[in-house]
């Protein structure tokens, strides 16, 4: 499953390279990278809800009720989401340039078309997340990741063939087709059961999901704020900044799964028996590994990504907007802070404390959001990148201090 997941992540980067290579104009690539944030935000929120509420609930209920509950939820998502998405699709000329105000001329028309199609894709994207939760509950991990990889690969191949002929807006239709096809393939593994049997099982899911959704909506809309600001930058800047961000956040996610999440059982067990030495040893060991891995990742990205990107993409893209290597350097705190922050948060969770890291992050995130808008408008895009690194590293420092105090309280007791 891990290999399939890594292959899917690699395919997503291949799609970005294809866009940078074949987009007719630098601003066309910017329009795609800006509008793709819409289903990205929806998917991020849905994944939080699925992993935090739906998946545990599906694992608890019987195998007979499980398909009915998932069918009911899919029906609810489509019935509630598709009409809203359709309205947003037709009203895209009125709201797109409010969210992404930097596009003018031909680029504005491309942005409007892509944004409308992205909105139309959103309920289908959420459906794929719900069906992934079902396949995980059924322990069909490889099947789910295989379908995701297949749909992502098909999208990349079709994009390489169609974008040079039909333009960047073809990618919007391809994304919509990708989510619909992926959902249909996942649904093939869903037994046919009466939907009415699943409504009762959804009540506890909703009770657990409300708080998660509220937090996720608050945090994840930061992506839209970024795209709003970056759309005002020079042509090509948005594409390269988003490309650099996605490299570090995806790599941090893989490292976090490999080292931060796998440390949770050991930390939980050590806390349960009040073994301070074991808790500290496991925490320190994984901190060192994550620190070394994230620093090596950062150095490799700074050294290798710019020449590879220059070789594979258009020269007009690489020489417009901002310097990609400088952006990667300024984003250096992102992979380091994201990896170590995930481990520190898991240490809190192992002690049964989810409130402290959540409330702390809400506070620092709010300050960061305001500072980011001020810094971008007053200083510029490089200061915006550096501030993002400062935010991730400051989060780690504050969380480490709170964790040290929490450990003294817990193990003293």
Image: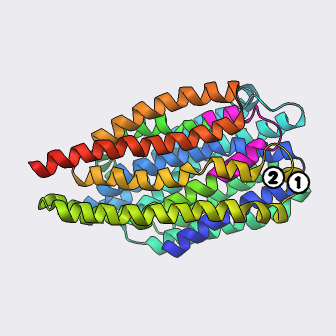
Q: How far apart are marks 2 and 1 (CA)?
A: 6 Å
Q: Nearer the viewer, residue 12 or 64?
A: 12
Please tell me the numbered disc located at residue 170: 2
Q: Which region of the structure is painted magenta?
A: 225-245
Label 1 Cα crowd, 10 Å radius (few <14 / some 14-19 / many 20+) = few
Tell me, yes or no, whether the highlighted magenta stretch contains residue 83: no
Q: Is residue 188 above or below residue 386?
A: below
Residue at image location 33% in from the left, 54% down from the top: 346
**Tags 2 and 1 in contact by the CB under 8 Å rule?**
yes
Q: Can residue 394 be seen in this view?
A: yes
Colouring convention used in this rendered image of the protein: rainbow
Q: Position of residue 320 (x, y in %)?
A: 85, 45
Q: Where is residue 272 in the image (x, y as percent from the top left)?
A: 14, 59
Secondary element under disc 2, as helix, strand or loop, is helix
Q: Tell whether 343 sits left or right of 237.
A: left
Q: Tell whether 294 sits left or right of 377.
A: left
Q: Tell whether 196 sits left or right of 128.
A: left
Query: What residue is pinned by disc 1?
Result: 166
Secondary element under disc 1, as helix, strand or loop, is helix
Q: Is the magenta stretch mostly helix, strand or loop?
A: helix
Q: Is residue 220 above or below residue 348?
A: above
> Residue 82 appears in which quarter of the rendering?
top right
> Residue 267 appears in which quarter of the rendering?
bottom left
Q: Is residue 234 above or below residue 126?
A: above
Q: Can residue 155 be seen in this view?
A: no
């Amino acid at each position: 499953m891990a290999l399939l997941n890594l292959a899917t992540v690699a395919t997503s980067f291949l799609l970005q390279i294809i866009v940078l290579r074949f987009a007719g104009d630098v601003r066309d690539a910017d329009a795609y990278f800006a509008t793709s944030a819409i289903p990205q935000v929806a998917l991020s929120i849905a994944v939080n809800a699925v992993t935090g509420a739906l998946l545990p609930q599906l694992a608890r209920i019987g195998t007979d009720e499980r398909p009915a509950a998932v069918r009911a939820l899919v029906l609810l998502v489509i019935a509630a989401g598709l009409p809203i998405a359709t309205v947003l699709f037709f009203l895209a000329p009125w709201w797109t340039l409010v969210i992404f105000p930097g596009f003018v001329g031909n680029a504005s028309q491309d942005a409007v078309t892509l944004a409308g199609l992205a909105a139309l894709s959103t309920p289908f994207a959420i459906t794929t997340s719900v069906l992934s939760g079902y396949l995980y509950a059924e322990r069909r991990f490889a099947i789910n990741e295989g379908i995701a990889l297949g749909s992502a690969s098909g999208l990349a191949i079709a994009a390489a063939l169609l974008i040079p002929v039909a333009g960047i807006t073809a990618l919007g239709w391809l994304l919509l087709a990708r989510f619909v096809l992926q959902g249909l393939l996942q649904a093939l593994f869903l037994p046919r059961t009466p939907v009415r049997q699943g409504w009762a099982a959804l009540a506890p899911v909703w009770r657990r999901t409300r708080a998660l959704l509220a937090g996720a909506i608050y945090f994840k809309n930061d992506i839209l704020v970024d795209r709003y600001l970056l759309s005002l930058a020079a042509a090509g800047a948005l594409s390269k900044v988003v490309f650099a961000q996605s490299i570090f956040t995806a790599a941090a996610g893989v490292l976090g799964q490999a080292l931060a999440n796998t440390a949770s059982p050991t930390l939980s067990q050590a806390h349960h028996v009040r073994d301070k030495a074991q808790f500290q040893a496991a925490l320190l060991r994984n901190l060192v590994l994550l620190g070394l891995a994230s620093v090596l990742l950062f150095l490799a990205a700074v050294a290798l990504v710019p020449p590879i990107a220059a070789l594979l993409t258009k020269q007009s893209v690489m020489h417009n907007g901002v310097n990609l290597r400088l952006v990667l350097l300024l984003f250096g705190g992102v992979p380091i802070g994201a990896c170590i922050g995930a481990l520190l948060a898991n240490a809190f969770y192992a002690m049964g404390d989810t409130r402290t890291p959540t409330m702390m992050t809400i506070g620092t995130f709010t300050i960061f959001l305001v500072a980011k808008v001020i810094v971008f408008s007053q200083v510029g895009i490089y200061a915006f990148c550096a501030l993002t690194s400062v935010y991730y590293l400051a989060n780690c420092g504050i969380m480490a201090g709170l964790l040290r105090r929490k450990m003294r309280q817990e193990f003293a007791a």
